[in-house]
Image (spheres, rainbow, N blue to C red):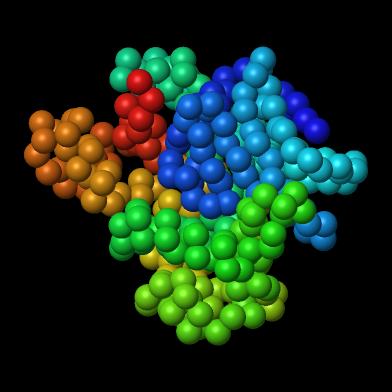
Amino acid sequence: MQISIPVPPAFSFKRTAMSHGWRSLLPFEFDETTWSITRVLDLHGDDPVTVQITSLNDALQVSIPRRKFGKRDAELIVRDVRHMFRLDDEMNIFYEAVADDPDFNWIVREGAGRLLRSPTVYEDLVKTICTTNCSWALTTKMVEGLVKHLGRETAQGDGRRAFPTPEAMAAEPESFYRDTVRAGYRANYFKELADRVASGELDVESWMTSPLSTDELKREMKRVKGVGEYAADNLLKLLGRYDCLALDSWVRATFARLHNRGRTADDSKIARHYARFREWRGLALWCDMTRDWIE
């Protein structure tokens, strides 16, 4: 079975897929040889389904192997794919902001700027917590543990699993995250977050459409245990808010290499470099830092 989803004129599958590391964290799988993303989607009632996503003829081609599905399932698949690839994001204002800048107009030519995200804010939040103060290898290991132990299996019998629901995570004791997932001090963060979301106390999905200002929303995010300044800034980008820079050691080192002759630059200098892009400065910075990820 296959679904074709038209994409906006200025859209790059490669740039979106390669926009950051989510492509390689389960239940995403990325194949750079075929330029395809395989993903398990939870259909919220029906069994999860594995889909493979490629780009062809100005559309995303979504293949669903060995699975019959009805109209409702097809609508959920399209909704999730559009959300993950940011097909409904309005990028024209950003493109206008960088179009006349010789150092940044490549973004328009190459259709960059859409940051791959998960189908839910909850998944993005858990994964963001997995990235703080650790190596990428450890991040990958923790996410694998969560998916393989708590995710629901697909109906296709391919051995793949969906990302765990808040309810599935809340059902486990804190010791599970410490001893099985090897999450260390994050064990308490995962348990408390899952409990709050599963009980309805915390609605993280509402952050997508929150009327709060960025600063107000950031303060709300930082009330979640395990979410500090850097994690909140990164999550805001996945919500479509780009007025935060999200500086970490890798960004600082890359900026030094690209713009400061290899010398360490203080954060105020980095901020000044992108200040002209105003509310889009965080996205301009990220595109700049990752430009050479695709040659």
What residue appears at the point 51 percent right and 34 percent down from the top-left corner? Answer: 31
Query: Position of 181 compared to 265: left or right?
Result: right
Q: What x and y, as percent, mark residue 126?
A: 51, 63
Q: Quadrant of residue 120 in the image? A: bottom right
Q: Quadrant of residue 56 in the image? A: top right
What residue appears at the point 43 percent right and 79 percent down from the top-left corner? Answer: 178
> Which quadrant holds the C terminus?
top left
Q: What x and y, as percent, mark residue 277?
A: 39, 32
Q: What x and y, as percent, mark residue 19?
A: 45, 36
Q: What x and y, as percent, mark residue 99?
A: 43, 17
Viewer-side residue, 94 vs 179: 179
Query: Position of 293 compared to 57: left or right?
Result: left
Can residue 62 be seen by looking at this rendering?
Answer: yes
Viewer-side residue, 72 vs 35: 35
Query: Position of 254 compared to 228: left or right?
Result: left
> Which quadrant holds the N terminus?
top right
What residue appears at the point 68 percent right and 73 percent down from the top-left corner? Answer: 167
